Amino acid sequence: MSDEPDDSQEEFEPLETEQPTVDAGSPRAVKKRLTKLQVQEREGDRFWEEVFKSEVGRREMWRLLSQAHPFDTTFACGPNGFPQPEATWFKAGEQALGLRIYQSWLAKFPLDVMQMQREHDPRFAKRDK
């Protein structure tokens, strides 16, 4: 045995986390945590509501959404016309994410999202009669 301290037995300080641990056995702590989550959800809903109420907000949200091509199904081919399954699956992932975002917006703000789509989706463009 040596008089040197054993480095393998060092004590580590616990890492600090952003969210405190909730005592699941305490109804008061659980209620406080739920209340905080509900407040955060309401704040988020108000933010998105303001975004979709403005013309600029709808235009920018459409621009972001359209980058994922949520309403298009793409089958990728290489330059020689041969199918590229990996690229097709990549495009399918983009589409799925875009569609999921669109549907989440539509579930919370149906009128504003439909207004956004009427304003920017070429499939909903007004045709001259």
Image: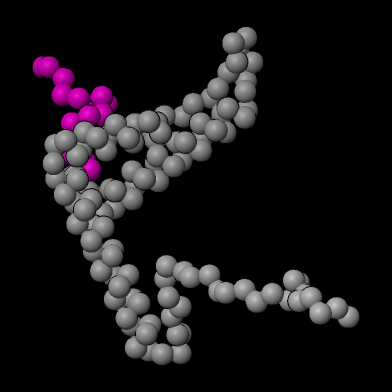
Q: Position of residue 61 (x, y in %)?
A: 27, 38
Which quarter of the figure has residue 54? Answer: top left
Q: Is any atom of residue 111 visible in this view?
A: no
Which quarter of the figure has residue 121? Answer: top left
- Give the left or right position of residue 118, taking residue 83 as reference: left
Which quarter of the figure has residue 66? Answer: top left
Residue at 47% from the left image edge and 69% from the top image edge: 17
Quarter in which the C terminus is drawn: top left
Magenta region, residue range: 113-129
Residue at 29% from the left image edge and 31% from the top image edge: 63
Q: Is any atom of residue 77 visible in this view?
A: yes
Residue at 57% from the left image edge and 33% from the top image edge: 89
Principal secondary structure, stretch drawn in magenta? helix
Q: Tell me, what colour scheme is on the image?
A: one colour
Question: Is 41 located above or below residue 125 in the figure?
Answer: below
**Is 60 included in the stretch rendered in magenta?**
no
Q: Nearer the viewer, residue 2 or 128?
A: 2
Figure label count: 0
- Give the left or right position of residue 77, taking residue 69 as reference: right
View extreme (top): residue: 80
Quarter in which the N terminus is drawn: bottom right
Q: Position of residue 76 (x, y in %)?
A: 55, 22
- Give the left or right position of residue 4, taking residue 104 as reference: right
Q: Position of residue 19 (x, y in %)?
A: 42, 71
**Is 127 included in the stretch rendered in magenta?**
yes
Q: Nearer the viewer, residue 13 or 100?
A: 13
Residue at 58% from the left image edge and 18% from the top image edge: 77
View extreme (right): residue: 1
Q: Position of residue 52 (x, y in %)?
A: 19, 44
Question: Is 103 located above or below residue 77 in the figure?
Answer: below
Question: Is 86 located above or below residue 24 in the figure?
Answer: above
